[in-house]
Image: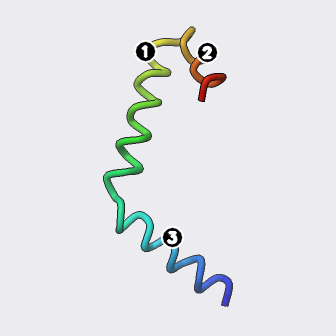
Amino acid sequence: MVQSLRVTTNDTQPVSQPTTPPAVHTQPIETVTNNDQTTTPQNGLV
């Protein structure tokens, strides 16, 4: 029963908001790759 619930939640999340994960992942990856020194202060602020 637990597995069934988990599978449904995982399937609904990506399908419901497919643009949210990629957009959020693209921002941090670009910033970290562009500013190596900014990665340390940014992590502390976040």
Could you tell me residue 4's position as x and y percent?
59, 86
The scheme the figure's colours follow is rainbow
Q: Is residue 35 left or right of residue 17?
A: right
Asked which secondary structure carries label 3, the reply is: helix
- Identify which amino acid the numbered label 3 is placed on: Asn
Work out which quarter of the rendered image holds the N terminus and state it. bottom right
Could you classify mark 3 by the number of other residues whose Cα lies within 10 Å: few (under 14), some (14-19), or many (20 or more)? few
Residue 41: give its label. Answer: 2
Residue at image x 46%, y 19%? 33
Comparing labels 2 and 1, the label whose residue is closer to the camera:
2
Nearer-N-terminus badge (2/1): 1
Q: Position of residue 42 (x, y in %)?
A: 57, 20
- Residue at which label 3 appears: 10
* Residue type highlighted by circle 1: Asn
Query: To which residue does mark 1 refer?
Result: 34
Percent x, y of residue 37: 57, 8
Give the residue at x 49% y 21%: 32
Using the image, determine if residue 33 lies above or below residue 20: above
Q: Which image quadrant for residue 7?
A: bottom right
What is the distance, in whole Å, between disc 1 and disc 3 at their CAs?
A: 32 Å
Direction top: furthest residue: 37
| Residue 23 in which image quadrant | top left
Of the two numbered discs 3 and 2 on the same chain, state the one appearing first in sequence: 3
Q: Residue at point 59% right, 83% down?
A: 5
Q: CA distance from mark 3 to mark 2?
A: 32 Å
Q: Secondary structure at mark 1?
A: helix
Q: Which of the two labelled residues, at mark 1 and mark 3, occupies the earlier sequence position?
A: 3
Q: Residues within 10 Å of mark 2 (few under 14, many from 20)?
A: few
**Residue at position x 52%, y 74% in the image:** 9
Q: Up-down: is 41 above or below 23? A: above
